[in-house]
Amino acid sequence: MGQRATISTINGVNLKALFEPSRIAVIGASRRKEAVGYAILHNLAAAGFQGKIYPVNPKADRIDDLICYPTILDVPDSIDLAVIIVPSASAPETLEACGKKGIHTAIVVSAGFREIGGEGIRLERELAEVAKRYSISVLGPNCLGLINTDPTISMNASFSRTMPRPGNIAFVSQSGALCTAILDYAKGENIGFSKFVSLGNKANLTELEILAYLKDDPKTSVILMYLEDLVDGSAFIQLVREITGDMKHPKPILAIKAGRTPQGAKAASSHTGSLMGSDEVYDAIFKQGGVLRVDSVNEIFDLAIAFASGVIPKSNRVAIVTNAGGPGIMATDSCVRYGLEMAELGSKTKEALKKVLPETANLSNPVDVIGDAQQDRYEHALTHVLNDPQVDNVVVILTPQAMTDIEGTARTIVKVNQTTKKTLLACFMGIVDVTPGVKILEEHDVPHYRFPEEAARALSALVRYKEWIDRPRTEVKTFPVDLKITETIIRESKSQNQKLLNTYQAMKILQAYGFPMLPFELAHSAGEAADKAKAIGFPVAIKVVSSTIIHKLDVGGVQLNLHSSLEVERAFEAMMHNIRTREPKAKVEGVLVQKMGERGREVILGMKRDPHFGPILMFGFGGTYVEVFKDVTFRLAPIRQLGAKRMIESIRAYPILKGVRGEAPADFNGIIDCLQRLSQLACDQPEIIEIDVNPLVTYESGKGVVVVDARMILK
Amino acid sequence: MGQRATISTINGVNLKALFEPSRIAVIGASRRKEAVGYAILHNLAAAGFQGKIYPVNPKADRIDDLICYPTILDVPDSIDLAVIIVPSASAPETLEACGKKGIHTAIVVSAGFREIGGEGIRLERELAEVAKRYSISVLGPNCLGLINTDPTISMNASFSRTMPRPGNIAFVSQSGALCTAILDYAKGENIGFSKFVSLGNKANLTELEILAYLKDDPKTSVILMYLEDLVDGSAFIQLVREITGDMKHPKPILAIKAGRTPQGAKAASSHTGSLMGSDEVYDAIFKQGGVLRVDSVNEIFDLAIAFASGVIPKSNRVAIVTNAGGPGIMATDSCVRYGLEMAELGSKTKEALKKVLPETANLSNPVDVIGDAQQDRYEHALTHVLNDPQVDNVVVILTPQAMTDIEGTARTIVKVNQTTKKTLLACFMGIVDVTPGVKILEEHDVPHYRFPEEAARALSALVRYKEWIDRPRTEVKTFPVDLKITETIIRESKSQNQKLLNTYQAMKILQAYGFPMLPFELAHSAGEAADKAKAIGFPVAIKVVSSTIIHKLDVGGVQLNLHSSLEVERAFEAMMHNIRTREPKAKVEGVLVQKMGERGREVILGMKRDPHFGPILMFGFGGTYVEVFKDVTFRLAPIRQLGAKRMIESIRAYPILKGVRGEAPADFNGIIDCLQRLSQLACDQPEIIEIDVNPLVTYESGKGVVVVDARMILK
């Protein structure tokens, strides 16, 4: 992680040469039509590249009508971009020649690197070193290449035969093969792209540098990604937060992260050799960065065409206009399932509809214009429904019935769409008969779907994105804490080679970080325990303090509800006896004498330091519940106040915290405060690799929270 | 419900005339090309109907080249099927004329009935009466018509322009407009149908009669349904259980039930005016009948083409063969998400693969044959993987890469598919370039998908259907019960106009039905309560017995853990005082003195009699949990042993019942027994409309269950 460039430097000039070169050298260009080295050269020319192309091949004088050079050093002109398709073994040396020639940007298409293991790993490392030594920005290796549809560039520097039509969607993929499938799919669905980038093995350039370029690319307004891993979670979050929400004209990012299931992740490992984080961590990263995570290629494009239209809904209230009842019900089902709200049409709207629709029409939402509706009836219905202040989104459904004028209705929808600022999605059900209508919608950028559920899903994504943009912005809070106590404890433990902090140490650190605690003291004898208990006030609990005992309960190391000095003394003796019997080698540093707290609702806070992504915070509901349902949520530290709030709201047991059967809500502010303190602790103290605050007991709103027990592990 | 025909009579001869008529009269045939009355006549002729067509229209002599008759009574020949397209107001009289003519089968296409309310409802009732009086089987009204693609019939008796190609899939739809969309979609995807039925308002023929016909239709092997309601849940379950599992060659049924969400159901109501049951009830009906419920049109056809191939997998173990790593990971993700198991390939298979695949290939599942794979490599890989005894299903993925021979690979897949009995699904990713390959797969009935997640979803449906077919068959058990006690209690309560049974009565009925109870007695005074407590043995609970108090706890009507006669007496007095104060008008019939039970895990059993579907059983986890998470499941009574077991297994809290942290499992046999007894009680006693057994406490496996409290409400 330390080796990653910062955002300001990934925002460098080099990527202009990658995306907008004037002179491209194709090193390893070939005359054999079935070779990749021919395909790329051919595709560059076929797509009408606006600059100049220099094939490099020692065995050829000309390829097609281009002069060929034996080596890159023989090329007479300066070169912006080298596309390298030589065998992997000679790739490092070829890249070095590019460096000597003064080329600062390259795409290494060749495979045979990290993905094959062994020698491939070594070659990739060498390639990366050459790139670094000569300051070359390298895309790949093992990639499909790069496409820029901007007519002033018109570059297909890839071995995909398909050059997509220009559009405002950028696609960035960590799988080259998926790119070919996507390009074919996009051709069939007539989807346009601004840029198409195959990342390959990410030996040098990664998703970060590409995103930084796309951030400022005026041709791109929606970014799609297929990812198998991320090189740096924190940097990714920081960058995409800016892209998706904080810059002047934010751009939505939609991502498929493969390797979602444990088995899928295993396959990813053997495929790219990259270290896969667990899926929950990626979920957290996407949530924190405002990236909409999707599961399938279908879905990503269904969403993308809605986003590409550029209309962001004001609210989640939707009306449906349909010429068929059944599909209207299906659309309603889907809208509700995707969290949209069916708009209640105003009486004015209903009266207006009554005048223009036949008697048998349904004037409530979903509005049914009846099977024999022509475009005029659609136009009336759409206009009135869009005028209703309760309606911010409309899904218009057409089924190809006997009387339906499909093209006429499409033209009407286009016309209505041009006069409204509200979101209008069309659903022309079918494939063959509806095609002429769909083409009209397509040409005029009306997002269109084959079935209502797809339209509802896309609309719900627009709404979620709107919520993201509009979210209240909160800052990472820094609490005054007692670093000295914390660092002394950690230093002492380290010096004694002690990995597990004992309960007293863990509690002291949490106290130093301002967590609300039940009063507690350390005692070394039965008498001292009794005295301290008296000072604290009964009832108390005593807990063994040990840097070797992981599960205190299992060795009889916890005694609750002690009401007198005598009870404390007896409990102390019994505990020591238990431990001596059950775990004779245990190192006992004393007992924690702790005030018994009132009963409340129990939650768990935790932190685990991921070798790849740094500290990851956890929040969950306590007790048996968390074990059975794994009802927990994660976020990368640092978190903001809003992030902490969202963590609490996102667990399934949230209703229990809100209060059931008239019960008051939990003290959310107290939990939010603790989560932020935990975040600060995790960021401050890299020596701590795991923390459990379990349980944190929360009382009713305003009555606070207290830490009852804790556990910490050092590196 | 009492008016519904039984399965044997819905299996009647009339439907032969509906699906396979020789002579069709089209009443309301028209010369106006834009009229439905023209469209149907034209479609019948255009589809090449193999019988004879008789247009009926008093204002025409001929339509196209057919002789036209002024009324149906003027038609010289006998008629098998009348298709009626006259205005709704004259439909009953037209149907009556058909009856007089001796026609026993009709399709009423005309709209303007129940769906428009008011006069339409009256007309529909009249139509149904005529149908009954003349024993005419009537499809509709308000429907698109009916299609039979059997070449010996070749009938398009609908106003859809599209006649689908023949196939083995039957489609039955309660929405006519959806039919037009589906037919257009199927044309685009080249999906064939055996029969296509638009049910309309179901005034006479319903899904039951149509299903009974399709059950025995040799041309149909898969049945798809779009439903908005069911006319009779029990009859539906009985019939579809036979179709989907119990007959010799069972046929899968896939269904979309619209109006899934409350809002969707509201739309359904206003659309068809039909009474919608709650969604959970439909879920229960489909589960009990082995019907696979799906959410979307996409999904139903993705599943249908897999089922249409006729191959049912042996297990859920799947292997993936791909020419691209990324899509392989996505497929793995999807398979795992849909509950499939990634097969562990045997060492023999891996060795064999090693010999035929390049060094960089991935020999584990997902098997990656690498981007430059030609058909020979696919053939080797598929053959070896299909030979592995660990593999019962294969998903083969193709991305259209530079070196890929799409058609050659498709032909190879067809060849391999013809030599294996295992399930083989293909996924050719993309649209345009892959089309020639997809066509080849289509022609040879290889189920094919555009993206891996669709293949995984379809495969998982096949696996679920296999599990349904293979499920152990259990019978509805009849326990010996004490009907006399039960019926006396009910009779007495009814005679006193008492709707709510008191706790003692409810407990007595459960006892009469053999539920295991804690010992209990009824007492009328403090002294009697103390005596009975002594006889039962301490500790005891006392609970107020009242037919007017619904929530005993709220009026202080429950006292737990009483350890002596004195405590019982005091509790009795306190309770009476509480009730007098809080609910002075309450009718108190005594107190229930009940032995305190040991603690255990609490569950809830319940029954609610639905006016439409009869008794519906409920099972859920007890305590706060059930309130917050609504973690309950439903089944229509009667249930079998397996159904009871499935109810328990299907709640989310099932792991808690299985036991967490080394805890023993709950007494499942005890719960299953109680659910079956509850089922019997619900079926025996139609006067009881609601039952709560809450809580039923379950102890560890083998240690039984006991009813702690109960509530029953009479009609």
Image: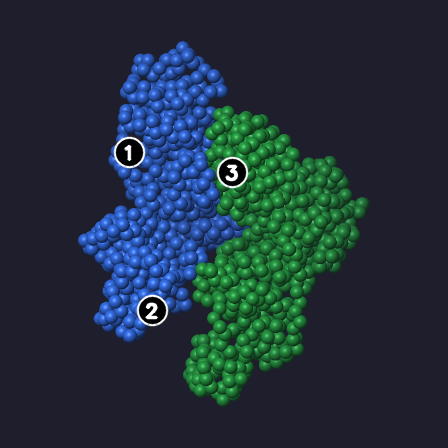
Chain colours: A green, B blue
The chain that hosts pointer 1 is B
* x 44%, y 51%: residue: B340
Q: Quadrant of residue B291?
A: top left
Please state which amino acid type lies under the numbered disc 1: Ile
Q: Amino acid at mark 2?
A: Ala
Where, quadrant-wise, is the N terminus of chain B in this rendering?
Answer: top left
Task: State which mark lies toward you, 1 or 2.
Answer: 2
Total numbered labels placed on residues in the image = 3
Q: Is residue B401 above or below residue A672?
A: above
Chain letter of mark 3 equals A
Mark 1 or mark 2: name the one nearer the start of the chain: 1
Task: Decide which of A6, B54 is in the foreground and name it.
Answer: B54
- Give the residue at x 41% y 30%: B118
In this rendered view, identify the residue nearer to me: B122 or B403. B122
Q: In this figure, which residue is indicated by the disc labeled 2? A: B574
The Cα–Cα distance between marks 1 and 2, rounded to whole angstroms, is 63 Å
- Residue labelled with disc 1: B10
Is label 1 or label 3 in front?
Answer: 3
Give me the disc on residue B437. Answer: none
- Helix, strand or loop at label 3? It is loop
- Judging by the rendered image, the residue that carries numbered circle 3 is A365
Residue found at x 62% / y 35%? A417
Q: x, y percentage for residue A344? A: 53, 41
